[in-house]
Image (tube, rainbow, N blue to C red):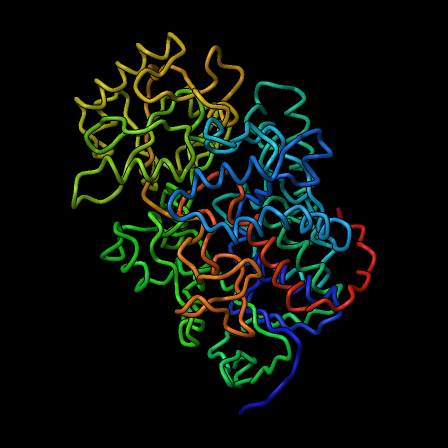
Amino acid sequence: MTKTVECDVLVVGSGAGGFAAAVTAASHGLTVILAEKAEFVGGTTAFSGGFLWVPNNPVSRRDGIEDSVEEARTYLRHEAGNHFNAECVDAFLNHGPDAVAFFETRTAVTFEAASAFSDYHPTAPGGRSGGRSIKAQAFRGEALGGELKRLRPPLPELTFVGLMIGSGPELKHFFNVTRSLTSALYVGGRLASHARDLLKHKRGMLLTNGNALAARLFRSALDLGVDVWTEAPATRLIVEDGAVCGATVSKAGQTVTVRTRRGVVLAAGGFPQDKERRRAVFPHDQDNDGHVSPAPVGNTGDGLRLAEAAGAVVEDRYPNAAAWVPVSRVPRKGGGFGVFPHFIDRAKPGLIAVLPNGRRFVNEANSYHDFVQALFAAKKPGEPARAFLVVDKPFLKRFGLGFVKPFPVPVGPNIRSGYLKTGQTLAELARNAGIDPAGLEETVATWNRDVRSGEDRAFGKGSTAYNRFNGDPDFTPNPCLAPIETGPYYAVEVAVGDLGTFAGLRSDGHARVLDRDGRPIPGLYAAGNDMASIMGGNYPGGGITLGPALTFGYIAGRHLAGGAAAVDAPARPDAA
């Protein structure tokens, strides 16, 4: 059974890029259908930390930060190197602040500053020690009404008894709950509020991080009349006379032909779960056993395949095909495992990362992307890319480790599941974890000798503003250094995962997808991880996937409107 519907714009995918395009186009009076393959909207955005990297943005300016397009361009030219795309970078830098302002003033999306959050390479030309990253404000789930059931829940491994914990100041309260009365009262209040939500709604209702951003974009789309379809994968683009004029979508057991008057935006989340394409561009995943992605299982490269069939080209020349992150496999009750991305714990004082030979290979407090690149460089050819995060008892009690929560949460279940390896001595831990005992003992002895001076002579842990931001200021003179000397000792094994793929569709500064000759394909746009990353395979700062996703979604929506007069958005719901 088939039927045909018409609209101005069809958006494929519902992460930040897809929703941004849909909301922007709808705000300009266009009729928009958003088709999402999964049963939930939100894509990878709903799993994320929720930061957006947008230089010179108005949120940071309100917080007293001064930035410039010129400095940011210098930084991105340095970071992207030979893969610097001047047209797309300039579009991002020129329109990013406007995009943030648009969503803040005309939709249900609001942001807060993260002015102390440093660029990941702050000492590089044009780099800054803070002010380019912002994040969505928390959001109450009640504001979505019955549509809340269609919002993708957060990764369960990143919650505590279902409670979403906001990154930044809120997370610090949870770390300090046993050492600060203020923090204890704060955490107690959050847990009590969460318990009330569970009793009333059967789920947590205070949405934070990327889940809050996805919820706010979803609310905005609904307010503007976007027709949001779920469990509706796009299966083929309709191309007539060289122009894309719609797509076929499988919905409720029938094929729907969606004909568009303006165009189609592909924002289907890249290809982190496409094993065939991963084998082609992930050198560490040739047998599909070397990579563990926390991305939604439906992110299988649909947008890229649809576009390639219409003559588009995927950019595959970047030095890194994805945004790498070290992850650990968390055994789940009933079988299988979840995935925990290690963002912050690596910078805390008293943690080292070692190879199976027991030797360090990296400044552990560097960005997750840099950490994995160092792992690739250090591992022996032919061996899997894996490492171990090693700590002692005081560290685990204070900070936890990966999925393991700090005191007073019991660690026994994680030991029994095999997630957390332990030993009364370093040698015993090494044998239990599969690490060379002599190598680990020598590494820890060297570490303990050096950190007492406040300097990591081997790799410089704690030497940059970004390192120190994620450390602990209670530890002086270096917030990232503490000895490892009190047993029992613990370790968690980490492998390679991703926060999204960089190798996407070649596009221009209007977010138009390009053909093999570098010409725009009429009627076809890309945003989010379906668009080739403007970072050239590097990872300059927190939010370099979501910032461009929101910006190029906005650019695509405006270009599709073609100068149509913008209409006033409905009043923002009182949902913050």
Q: Is residue 337 above or below residue 377?
A: below
Q: Tell me: 171 left or right of 290.
A: right
User: Is residue 51 at least partly visible in the picture?
Assistant: no
Q: How many marks?
A: 0
- Residue 211 to residue 178: above or below: below
Q: Residue at x 44, y 66 (%)?
A: 518
Using residue 178 as the reference point, say whether residue 26 is left or right of it: right
Which x, y percent locates residue 14?
Answer: 57, 62
Q: Which one is nearer the viewer's eye here, 372 or 564?
A: 564
Q: Position of residue 133 (x, y in %)?
A: 59, 38
Viewer-proximal residue, 77 or 66? 77
Q: Is residue 366 at least partly visible in the picture?
A: yes
- Is 365 drawn above or below residue 416 in the view shown? above
> Residue 7's spot in the image, x, y percent?
66, 79
Return the residue found at the far top.
Answer: 453
Q: Position of residue 11 (x, y in %)?
A: 58, 69
Is 480 situated above or below 253?
above
Q: Residue at x 41, y 47 (%)?
A: 323
From the viewer's perspective, tell me whether residue 312 is left or right of residue 558: left
Q: Relative to the observer, which residue lies in front, 257 or 53? A: 53
